[in-house]
Amino acid sequence: MAPFWLQRLDAARSPRQRVLLWLGFTVLLYPGALLGMDFKIYHQPQISLRMVIGEGAIQEGDARKFQAIARLADRDKEGLVILVLNSPGGNVEAAFRVVDAMDKVRVYTAVPDNARCASALFLGGKGPIA
């Protein structure tokens, strides 16, 4: 017997119903898929700073999320918040809003060797991309 969600998908009559059901099940199974970037504070003990880590695809509302979490971060000796990025890209307009927020907060951006920044976010920040 097929799982419930597969039975519902097979029962959908129109392509529109199939797409809506698929999207609904995707959100239920992977709730983070549509939530945008995840910003969190990371305490770096070697330099005794709380920095911001931003990971994930960029969506509407991420600029507000970044500004809220950046308030909890420490500033380095130059007065900048360190922002470590790992993003596959996303909504371009939302990315430019995040860049504006980054300029207001004054950040130093870094992209670790094992990460990527395939977005407009590399345009923001005062520091070079590492």
Image: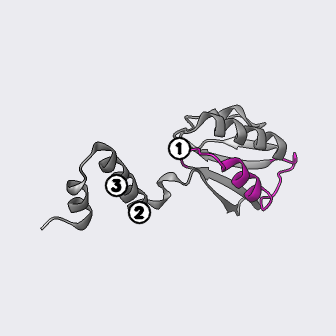
Looking at the image, tell me whether mark 2 or mark 1 is earlier in sequence order.
2
Residue visible at 59% across and 51% down in the picture: 37
- Specify whether residue 58 is painted magenta: yes
Dot 3 amino acid type? Leu
Indicate whether 65 appears above or below 102.
Answer: below
Query: Could you say where residue 23 lies in the image, as x and y percent from the top left?
Result: 39, 52
Q: Which residue is mark 2?
A: 28
Query: Image point 65% across, 40% down: which residue?
Result: 94
Question: Which mark's residue is nearer the viewer, 3 or 1?
Answer: 3
- Residue 21's label in the rendered image is 3
The residue located at (36%, 59%) in the rendering is 25
Question: Is 88 situated left or right of 23 in this image?
Answer: right
Mark 3 touching mark 1, by CB under 8 A?
A: no
The residue under label 1 is 115
Gap in angstroms between the C-alphas marked 3 and 1: 33 Å
Report whether residue 43 is seen.
Answer: yes
Marks 2 and 1 sit apart, C-alpha to C-alpha, by 27 Å
> Where is the N terminus found, in terms of image quarters?
bottom left
Please name the predominant secondary structure of the magenta segment in the image.
loop
In this picture, which residue range is highlighted in magenta?
Answer: 56-80
> Is residue 44 left or right of 1 when viewed as pictured?
right
- Residue 85 is inside the magenta segment: no
Of the residues shown, which amino acid type is indicated by label 2?
A: Leu
Q: Secondary structure at mark 2?
A: helix
